[in-house]
Amino acid sequence: MHAQRQARVAYIDMDYILSKLPSYLEAQRSLEDRVGGWQMEIAARKLALEALENELSAQKALLTSSLVEEKELEIQSTKASLVAYQQQRFGVQGDLLALRTSIVQPIQDLVFNEVQRLGKEKGYDLILDKSDGSTTILFANERFNLSNLVIRALSRQDMSANMGLSDAKINQGPEEDIPVNEALETKAAEDLEKVKVKEQQIAEKKAAREKKKSDKLPVKQKDSIPE
């Protein structure tokens, strides 16, 4: 209880701080403009896809099976291209994350570094951020960190997979998880590759049909066909 009474705790509002920084506001506007352009491109591609689907639906009864297959292939290719574009821009490892990191994260890091400096200089034990609706610890005095004591206690009691770890290994801290979530991107790439293969097959069949028709024409008629 005595240690708790002596602890010095403060908080900041990260959103408020950033809203007062001209460099951050300019970076946000740049980011929003770029994202707006991507969203407009996605909307345009969706309209184009819808137009292709409506056209096929209206003409399907009048088309030969081979032409229907070609139209359906075109629709599949357009869909695959749209999904790939969405993942490229807004996927887990897409352009949005990279752009936000490159133009916004450095400014947030400046604020974080200043909080670290103030925490050490002013002798605070904890500095919290209340801007996101929850409490985030931005600075903590290491003397309040009980993590290694808990790990050692659990190891001694045979209650953890960390049993038998040396103090040096424990003090390394948790390893960083590498995000692995590329399923959608891989699926989109595979679909696009399948579509390309099928397009090639359709093109070859079409060329064979045209050659077969040409071979059946009389010699004079064939000679009259312009190059």
Image (cartoon, rainbow, N blue to C red):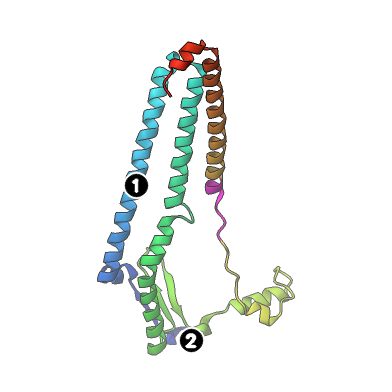
Q: Quadrant of the C terminus?
A: top left
Q: Residue at x 38, y 71 (%)?
A: 106
**Of helix, strand and loop, which one carries label 1?**
helix
The numbered mark, 2 or 1, whose residue comes first in the sequence reads 2
Where residue 40 sits: x, y (%)?
A: 32, 45
Q: Secondary structure at mark 2?
A: helix
Tag 2: amino acid: Ala
Residue 42 spot, x, y in % from top left: 37, 43
Residue 97 is situated, as x and y percent measured from the top left of the image, at: 43, 59
State the residue in front, 185 or 125.
185
Q: Which residue is mark 1?
A: 39
Kindly report which numbered mark, 2 or 1, lies closer to the viewer in this rendering. Answer: 1
Q: Which residue is mark 2?
A: 3
Q: x and y percent of residue 176 in the render?
A: 57, 68
Q: Callout 1, which amino acid?
A: Gln
Q: Which residues are magenta?
A: 179-186
User: What residue appears at the point 46 percent right and 31 percent down from the top-left corner?
Assistant: 74
* Residues at circles 2 and 1 in contact by the CB criterion of under 8 Å: no
Q: Nearer the viewer, residue 28 or 37?
A: 37
* Mark 1 burial class by Cα count in 10 Å: few <14, some 14-19, many 20+: some
Residue 181 on the magenta segment: yes
Which picture quadrant has residue 189?
Answer: top right
Is 90 positioned to the left or the right of 181 in the image?
A: left
For this rendering, which residue is in front, 49 or 118? 49
Task: Say if 99 sits above or below 61 in the image.
Answer: below
In the displayed structure, 208 sits above or below 152; it is: above
Up the image or down, 165 lies above or below 133; here it is below
Residue 1's place in the image compared with 102, above or below, is: below
**Residue 48 seen anywhere in this rendered image of the structure:** yes
Left or right for 1, reference 164 = left
Which residue is painted at 35% across and 35% down in the image? 47
